[in-house]
Amino acid sequence: MKESAVTTEALLEIMNNQLKTIDKQAKEIADLKEKVDYLLRQKFASSSEKFSSNQPSLFEEIPCDIEIVEDIEVETITVTRQKRGSRTTPCESLPHVRVEHDINEEEKVCSCGCGMKRIKEIVSHQYDIIPASFRVIDNVRFVYACLDKCGEAVKTSSLTPQVLPRHQVTPSFLATIAVQKFEDALPLARQVKIYKKRLGVNFTTTTFSNWMIKTSQLRLKLLIDRFATTQMYSGYIQADETTLQVLNEKDKIAKSKSFIWLKVSQDKHPIVLMHYSANRSCATAEFLFDGFTGYMQTDGYSGYNSVANKEGITQLGCWAHARRKFTDIIKSGASDELSKMYAQELVVMVAKLYKIEKEIKDDSPDTKKLIREDKSAEIIKTIKEWHESNFLKVQALGGAIARAFIYLNNQFTKLSIYLEDGRLSIDNNKAENHVRPIAIGRKNWLFATSTKGATALCNWYSVIETAKANGLDPYAYLCHVLTLLPIYQHEGKDIEDLLPWNVELR
């Protein structure tokens, strides 16, 4: 009997240990399924954070079918078919060519014998385009010499300072290449093929690449340095990073990842700066924020912690990143229903914060601060209490929901800081919006060949995105500055007039 009891106890212990192992393995399997589901959605699914109709949404839907109504004069009727064809009136800034369609002279005589009088016009619109065409600028200089052979040296008329001396390219052509690559995500190799096939002009990818790099070094660097100096005094910078593959990097294999670091300021002068780095270490963050004081807004990446610990810098968190941890669970096909319930509760509460931000987006900073203190602070307090009361229960569940709660716990103090100043944003989305063109371009041009190319890429993106942030057309701005920068540099003039916030382009 004693032996049987010992055996039974041993068996029970083995069974309990097995049950614990099975339970542990089940949690690990569920966690791995969530991770695989997340990676598959990151790779193949839409990047939109919108939900299906039965799930909470970050923003209320805004109806898009706005009807355009025009004033109708007695003598002219402009025909628009907004409802049927979703057509809009062409922009007034576009040149208009008047093409008249009249009846013949015989038809202008009424059957009663009298002449008919025109009483009105009916105008309809068609869009037309003039295809791109090449032309060659012949820069002609004149040489003068004394015919009496008095010994006076010959005189040659000087050439206006060129954007790239001794290179056969104009500011307009450089601006076209740059905008097509960095704004339209058209690789240089594809541009070369288009120019050869459609226009019969032969270039090489190497030529275009060299033009981009040399223009960046010779001209754009001057703008970038001024942007950086101005941004350091902005008092509020949002930061983010994205990956970049560089084929020829010292001590690195071609498939390894490098990074583009992004800094965005929106205070007085909107500035977007991008910086290439071979790594994602805190040393790069310290370099980029050296000498800066004020608010720094980032996601939860720990590489910024050493900067945040410096005197004079206050780090903000990003509610969009915190919320995304939970929306991924809601959209996941592998998460359990209890995890989704917790995630949905958080998303609904955060949506209330964003609703307030939407309502006050056009208010002054002082008004925003007052409304946030009155309304948003109470919601954040509710979120904190909800988080604390459910934290241990969620940790017992494990998986993605547990990690989301830990992220929220670690970031909570930083997530509340935006309440203290109306200039601050609830999230880091402005910086992310300027990362998007790189992400789109990366799918097309894939990589940078060299570190010089990666640096040039960052400089071109910085100038183009800063121009856009200041409401300027990138092509028009690049044509403007690439024409005037050589003259300003040659004459030693200050480039203040060429900065995007000081330029007015028609």
Image (tube, rainbow, N blue to C red):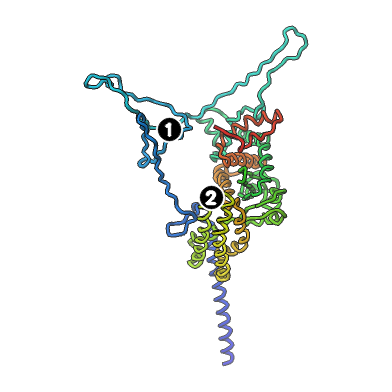
Q: In the image as oriented, which residue stretches furthest toward the right?
A: 151
**Residue 303 visible here:** no
The picture places residue 299, in percent across and down from the top left corner, at 61, 55
| Mark 2: few/some/many CA within 10 Å (<14, 14-19, 20+) | few
Q: Quadrant of residue 320?
A: bottom right
Residue with the mark numbered 1: 127
Which three-letter amino acid code belongs to the residue tagged 2?
Answer: Lys
Identify the residue shown where x is 39% and y is 42%.
67
Q: Quadrant of residue 27?
A: bottom right
* Mark 2 residue element: loop
Residue 232 drawn above or below residue 49: above
Residue 103 drawn above or below residue 278: above
* Mark 1 residue element: loop
**Is tag 2's residue or tag 1's residue first in the polypeptide sequence?**
1
The picture places residue 445, in percent across and down from the top left corner, at 57, 42
Q: Count every numbered label the image shows and give the total.
A: 2
The answer to whether 156 appears left or right of 355 in the picture is right
Identify the residue shown where x is 46% and y is 35%.
91
Mark seen at residue 361: 2
Give me the C-alpha separation between circle 2 and circle 1: 35 Å
Marks 2 and 1: which is nearer the front?
Answer: 2
**Residue 229 visible here:** yes
